[in-house]
């Protein structure tokens, strides 16, 4: 099978991740942060090691790293924990439903109002539109770093600087960029960085991270046991405990730790370069096939992500994805949980096919993909 | 002979971070459970060496210490 669905979750996982999860289930079976016996403390040590590695990758302190079950949960925790009744929020027109549905739900409950800022190829134009939507009660800008459908990157640093100058919080959805693009939270104007553990960080499914990079701690979305201050009726006011109630996903986190180790060893820069070179090769080959409509830009470092949105002439994307599956090629078709992005690009009627690359893809797979596309277009 | 001191910290994460910080500065330190916390479950660092310098280092690295007042007297409970 050729796996070109890495934007949904990366596969295969590096062998070190498989080994770490196996070892976690065999050797680190106690509940970390609850008891004082050796096994509990050893397990806690492994969980802490993951926080340290994430801290090394994103240049933050280990206690700033909050474990969640996925990027969506991280975004929910951050947005719902920050906004207050009467606040205004700005999002981009490339947002995944993980952001869009959260703010829409808060609007319907009468808690907030929000606006959608368009993203353009010209960063200054994008910035102008974000700035133009600011109000006196704007509390938060929540913005994806890169579209999960079309691969366009958003100038989050410039938007974040503008937000910081005005005392507005900046949340970045790094679902498609964590592990691929460099982040230095010591200098980048990001207050809340949300990411999955199972995509570009190569951890197991069921892992996610929220990095809180400001003194302003969100109110917890979920209250419960933290293994600290247990006789107090309220959640602790320190991280990570404030936002991590209940037992964490120990085996997932230990696997994630190995995944982050894999990224640190290979470096985001090299992984991004490898995937972008392959993406460009595939893009150029697809350009030469009659009947292929491409919606993504030609891959450009720093401007795009290693994914391509396309359609095949007169074939519904879902049908095309089924046909590709018969050729043993895994892609995702449809709307990719991103209504706003499809509306923006005019693909909201049928959706698109998304080809998304990962660290383990190779040129021969790109060749096989193009061959399969030609066969499908020829009706074979 | 080196002094052995228990330094209560606000969470297990801080205890583990503190352990690494102190080890980097040549201390022997262990993270473990604090059995004497008024506010319930908590963790502490057991440190061999100068406790005041160790505390200074911990604070310098952003580790939140817990005051001794918030701990129960050993062998007794707070009434």
Image: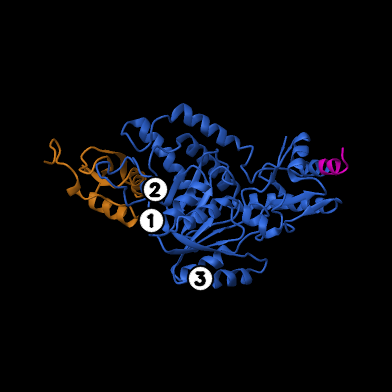
Chain colours: A blue, B orange
Q: Main secondary structure of the magenta part?
A: helix
Where residue B77 appears, as percent x and y from the top left, is 14, 38
Where residue A198 appears, as percent x and y from the top left, is 56, 42
Between marks 2 and 3, how big is the CA–CA gap?
29 Å
In contact (CB < 8 Å): disc 2 and disc 1:
yes
Of mark 2 and mark 1, the one earlier in the sequence is 1
How many C-alpha atoms fall within 10 Å of the one at disc 3: few (<14), some, or many (≥20)? Answer: some
Query: Would you identify the image quadrant in which residue A287 lies?
Result: bottom right
Q: Quadrant of the C terminus of chain B?
A: top left
- Do discs 1 and 3 share a chain? yes
Q: Which residue is mark 2?
A: A243
Of mark 2 and mark 3, the one earlier in the sequence is 3
Of all chains, the one bearing label 1 is A
Q: Which mark is residue A134?
A: 3
Residue in the picture at 58% in, 42% down: A202
- Region of the chain picked out in magenta, as a range: A372-380
Where residue A367 appears, as percent x and y from the top left, is 81, 43
**Front residue (pair A370, B27):** A370
């Amino acid at each position: 099978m050729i796996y070109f669905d890495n934007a949904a979750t990366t596969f295969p996982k590096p062998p070190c991740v498989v080994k770490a999860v196996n070892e976690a289930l065999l050797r680190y079976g106690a509940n970390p942060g609850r008891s004082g016996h050796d096994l509990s403390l050893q397990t806690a040590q492994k969980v802490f090691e993951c926080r340290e590695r994430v801290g090394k990758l994103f240049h933050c302190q280990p206690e700033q790293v909050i474990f969640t079950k996925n990027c969506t949960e991280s975004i929910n925790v951050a947005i719902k924990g920050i906004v207050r009744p009467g606040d205004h929020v700005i999002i981009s027109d490339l947002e995944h439903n993980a952001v869009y549905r959260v703010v829409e739900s808060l609007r319907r409950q009468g808690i907030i109002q929000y606006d959608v800022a368009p993203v353009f190829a010209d960063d200054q134009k994008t910035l102008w539109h974000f700035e133009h939507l600011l109000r006196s009660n704007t509390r938060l800008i929540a913005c994806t770093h890169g579209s999960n459908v079309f691969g366009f990157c958003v100038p989050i640093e410039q938007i974040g600087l503008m937000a910081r100058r005005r005392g507005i919080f900046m949340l970045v959805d790094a679902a498609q960029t964590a592990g691929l693009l460099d982040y230095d939270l010591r200098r980048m104007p990001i207050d809340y960085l949300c990411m999955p553990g199972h995509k570009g960080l190569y951890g197991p499914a069921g892992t996610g991270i929220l990095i809180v990079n400001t003194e302003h701690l969100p109110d917890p979305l979920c209250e419960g046991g933290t293994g600290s201050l247990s006789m107090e009726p309220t959640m602790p006011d320190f991280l990570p405990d404030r936002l991590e109630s209940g037992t964490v996903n120990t085996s997932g986190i230990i696997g994630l730790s190995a995944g982050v180790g894999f990224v640190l060893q290979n470096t985001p820069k090299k992984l991004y370069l490898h995937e972008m070179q392959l993406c460009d090769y595939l893009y150029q080959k697809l350009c030469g096939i009659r009947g292929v409509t491409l919606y993504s830009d030609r891959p450009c470092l720093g401007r795009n992500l290693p994914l391509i949105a396309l359609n095949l002439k007169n074939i519904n994307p879902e049908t095309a994805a089924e046909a590709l599956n018969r050729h043993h090629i895994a892609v995702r078709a449809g709307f990719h949980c991103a209504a706003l992005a499809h509306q923006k690009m005019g693909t909201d009627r049928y959706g698109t096919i998304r080809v998304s690359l990962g660290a383990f893809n190779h040129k021969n797979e790109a060749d096989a993909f193009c061959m399969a596309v030609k066969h499908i277009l020829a009706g074979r | 002979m080196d002094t052995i001191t228990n330094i209560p910290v606000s969470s297990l994460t801080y205890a583990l971070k503190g352990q690494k910080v102190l080890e980097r500065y040549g201390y022997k330190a262990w993270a473990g459970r604090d059995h004497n916390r008024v506010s319930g479950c908590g963790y502490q660092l057991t440190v061999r060496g100068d406790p005041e310098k160790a505390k200074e280092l911990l604070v310098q690295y952003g580790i939140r210490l817990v005051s001794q007042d918030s701990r129960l007297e050993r062998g007794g409970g707070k009434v």
